[in-house]
Image: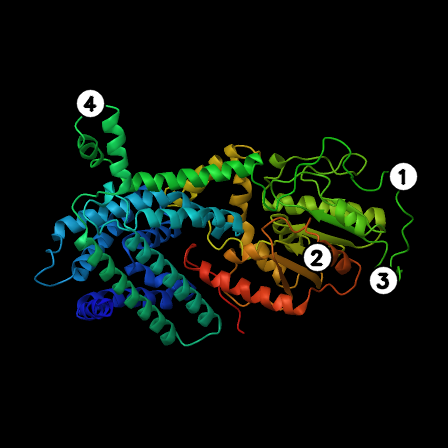
Amino acid sequence: MSAEITAATADGFLRHRALILVAAGGAVVEGAILTAIAPTALPVAAQVTALPPIAAYHDLRWLFADGQSWQGFAVVVAVVLAAHAVLDATLLRLAWPRGPAEPAPPRASRAFWSCLALTLVCWVILAPAATLTFGVAVLPFSWPLIGALPLVLGALLVLSHGGIAEGWWNRLPPLRMLGWLLGSFAVLSASSALIAHLDATRLDGGVLLTVVAVTGLFNARAWYGMAALAARLPARSSSVWRVWLRRVAWRRSSLPPRTPVRMLNGIPVAPLAGVLVLVLVIGVARLMFDGDISVGRHPPPPATGAVLGPARGSEPAYAVPGGSDGQGKDPASAVLVVEGWGTWCCDAANGLRVLEPRMMVRQFSYLGLDALGDPLRSSPDDDDLPLPELGDKIAAQVEYLHSVTHGSVDLVAESEGTLGVYAVLTRHPNLPVSSVVLLSPIIEPGQLRFPGTRDGSRPVPTQALNELNHLVGSMSPYGSTGASALLASVSQFGAQYFAGASSGNGPGRRLTVIPLADALTLPACSLPPGMMVVSGFHGGLLGNPAVLPVVARFLAGQPATLPAQNQARMRTAAEVITNVATAWRMPDVTVTCPAP
């Protein structure tokens, strides 16, 4: 019997040729446009005809990618809102099951306003997630995206029936509708991963559009499945939670038993559930900042007793430059450790100092040096510096270490500290730097910039990012301004400095180690041959017991490798994660993969 039902359902779907044509054809049309103007954004093309909540998130990211003033943004929002409401209403009516026993499809006007309302609700709830993804495109590191993805998936799930089921706003979706949304999320992720992988190999564009068309075909099947479920939903929900609330209210009052249900019918349950998802994500972020949840970050240093390096007057008698300590490394060298934003000075170099006792190992201070040349103790709210100033401060401290040791200086940078290294190598190419170690590096910063507007005002995405940055800063121990100066300077200089540091400026000896979590924000290209991938989160590698010995061996001139078999698996996992993530972050419109 179940096989007959499945066959009948499949036959019914295949008879909906107009639905298949619109869903697959709409995806191919956007795919063809992106192939011509922004090929690396092709992985998001099929989302244009996906289920309404997914399509709303697709539109919202494109709105954020186009920097507009409030006036221009409002016009674009109105046009996109109306256009996609028409498209969703058309897909809903085309997907509605046919037959004498089936209810009539919703009127065109009701479907239009229902889909329009759903898109508006999704945009409001998902605006923080879109802002985070916009920020990641400016300053690519994984923590914001790790925070955004649960919000996106949670909101999509609780609104999965939006625009399709009658009265969707005052009921939660049935489990089978959740299944269609999860299936669409998985298929779109797999499709994006396949397109990104094929595009990195420079495969013919026709093959990529075929993948987009097949994904659009699945979109049509998801619409048909959701419409079939919506056609059979009762006009009013009798879910367990409503029955429970009705019984509780009836027992504690003298109202008629059905009064609470009539009252609940006017409550926007689905939007409120989406808001609760947002509140939950913010609550978890707050717990992480308060220290109740700790992942991969260094604790603050003690008030006293931090090791700043060899005390003045007790520096070792360094050998003459050009000598050797028997390990292939000049003992007259020094190491400057540059940690990222939100860190403390000056104990982060202690672990490396223990492994390299013959080197002068110092931590960079964002406040500079005192009169004796020691790094000034700094706190997280001292780290928000523009990139040119950060690069110049690093250069000054490199020059000081060179004057003390009369030898070369190695740079070990982590997280946002790698941005400072890019600035140093671009602005000061003749510094006595012998090697560079990049841990949790920021790869391809400035993929999107803070564009200006004709009237000189800040565009909407920039204002949204500033407000979110202020909110996060207020929640965190880093100050209410957050990383505003850093974000603005990365938008202006990040791509330029990254290109300059990657074009051969500076030393040839380089070691790059990325944590697996940062694969979420890497460009969808093949990983460079010399890049190591390790398990971990962004910003925690300098204290990682598996990574620190590798760094020490590299600085000593010894081979710095990890097990080859493990590296092969980690690199494959990183590329898969990167390709999947392209479906849910900002569309890549500027990054171009090098020829294989």
Q: Earlier in the sequence, mark 1 or mark 4?
A: 4
- Across and down, in percent, residue 355 comes to 80, 52
Quarter of the picture holding the N terminus: bottom left
Amino acid type for the residue under numbered disc 4: Ser
Amino acid type for the residue under numbered disc 3: Gln
Q: CA distance from mark 1 to mark 3?
A: 27 Å
- Across and down, in percent, residue 595 comes to 53, 73
Neighbour tally class for label 4: few under 14, some 14-19, many 20 plus, Cα within 10 Å: few
Q: Nearer the viewer, mark 1 or mark 4?
A: 4
Q: Secondary structure at mark 3?
A: loop
Tell me what residue is drawn at x 41 percent, y 46 percent. 151
- Disc ID at residue 327: 3
Q: Secondary structure at mark 4?
A: loop
Please indicate whether residue 106 sits to the left or right of residue 434 in the image: left
User: Pointer 1: what residue?
Assistant: 313
> Which residue is nearer to you in this view: 5 or 320?
5
